[in-house]
Amino acid sequence: MAKEPCCVMKIGIDARFYGPVGKGLGRYTQEVVDNIIKINNVEDGDGFEFVIFLSPDNYDELIVGDLRIKKVMLNIRWYSWREQIFMPFYIWREKLDLIHFPHFNVPIFTPVKFVLTLHDLILTHFPTVRATTKHIFIYHLKNLAYRLVTKMAVKRAEKIITVSEFTKKDIIYNFKIAAEKIIVTYEGVANLAHGRDSLFVAKLDSREMLNKYHINENFLLYVGNAYPHKNLETLISVFGRLHSLRPEMKLVLVGKEDYFYDRIHNYASSLNLWQKENVNSPIVFAGYVPDSQLEIMYQEAKAYVFPSLYEGFGLPPLEAMAKGCPVVSSDRASLPEILGTAAVYFNPEDEDDMFSKINNVLDSRAFREELKLKGVEQSKKYSWWECANKTLDVYKQILLKK
């Protein structure tokens, strides 16, 4: 039974992913938490009390000055058995009316009402040992646990938040739940494409920055991780054909080096497109690139190419659009819904189609300029403030209903 609206209700948010520690999920968690706190401040007496659960790695990153916001440090790793056993106690101790989990890893014995954000069903659609560094037995055990935890969470959640209409339909199809239980709140994007003066200043430094990474002025760009569903091997194969036609062209892959990128290194090497000691290799593995330098890469790239087989939302190409880079994208999953008419699409499993579409964009400077303008406008449709506002509305639907 819900409390009377006049009472101040207490909402928990599991923000252990908050900030860079949680990678892509950390970005979502940080933006939602930060903006909900701002909105709650504006609402004054009509707002809620919040308990924000953080990890030791990000506890100091969240700065709050509102007495209605309490931080709690939990030294409990996500996806762990300790999360399932001990976290319910800390939730119960805070006497919460509701808690929001921004990912599928909901403790099975959560003692209060909860909201779940389910970003995608990648682990459902791509249950492959290529997507893990674990022993095959451990991987299958973890995959079984994922399915159990997700199924229980979807069944018990008061509401499920997801980030696209595509993912909403995917959840309904796979879990057979009512459509009205799922609320779509699109993610946001920072619109960082600058005006002419800023572009001019950036270009003054662009030559030095490009030289640092051994990049010329003719390159394609990919920014993101190298998980198998990102389909980078197909991109590299297609790029090999493009490079034969356009020997001046390079492919720049930006992403933190890890086991998955190591596999891509080996594949590129097998096609004679990359050698570790050769700075003139057609493919450049740039590793982690600071935002200020990445901004220049977006400005200078001929196009951003996104060959993914599955995305719940598709933030990377949208961010490329926001920064003024033409986008050539896979036509799968949520991508056409999110990117609209501002991208050129290809079938990610058809190398001829991918080759043709990228080549068409490279052939026409006027077309690339048109894509840039469309992309910036498309990115303006997505706001983290709006995402947080709709998330807060979901809390109100649950707690203030009679």
Image: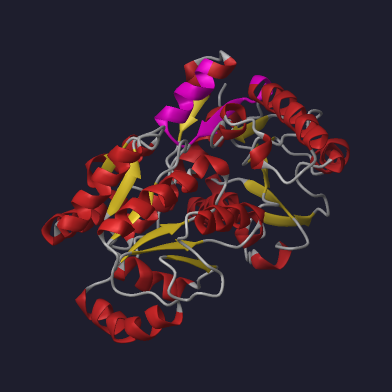
Please provide the residue range marked out in magenta: 155-173
Left or right? Give the position of 284 relative to 304: right
Q: Is residue 9 visible?
A: no
Q: Where is residue 87 shown, x and y percent of the image? A: 82, 41
**Residue at horizontal 24%, vertical 81%?**
200
Magenta run includes residue 160:
yes
Q: Where is residue 162 shown, x and y percent of the image? A: 50, 34
Figure quadrant of the N terminus: top right
**Residue at horizontal 67%, vertical 32%?**
114
Which of the 4 image quarters holds residue 352? top left
Q: How many numbered circles are shown?
A: 0
**Residue at horizontal 24%, vertical 44%?**
356
Vertical order, 364 against 210 (above or below): above
Depth order, front residue of 226/1: 226
Vertical order, 39 against 399 (above or below): below
**Residue at horizontal 34%, vertical 44%?**
329
Depth order, front residue of 66/351: 351
Vertical order, 145 against 16 (above or below): above
Q: Where is residue 305 shown, x and y percent of the image? A: 36, 52
Q: Is residue 211 visible?
A: yes
Residue farthest to the left?
Answer: 366
Q: Where is residue 237 shown, x and y percent of the image? A: 42, 48
Magenta run includes residue 29:
no
Left or right? Give the position of 11 relative to 319: right
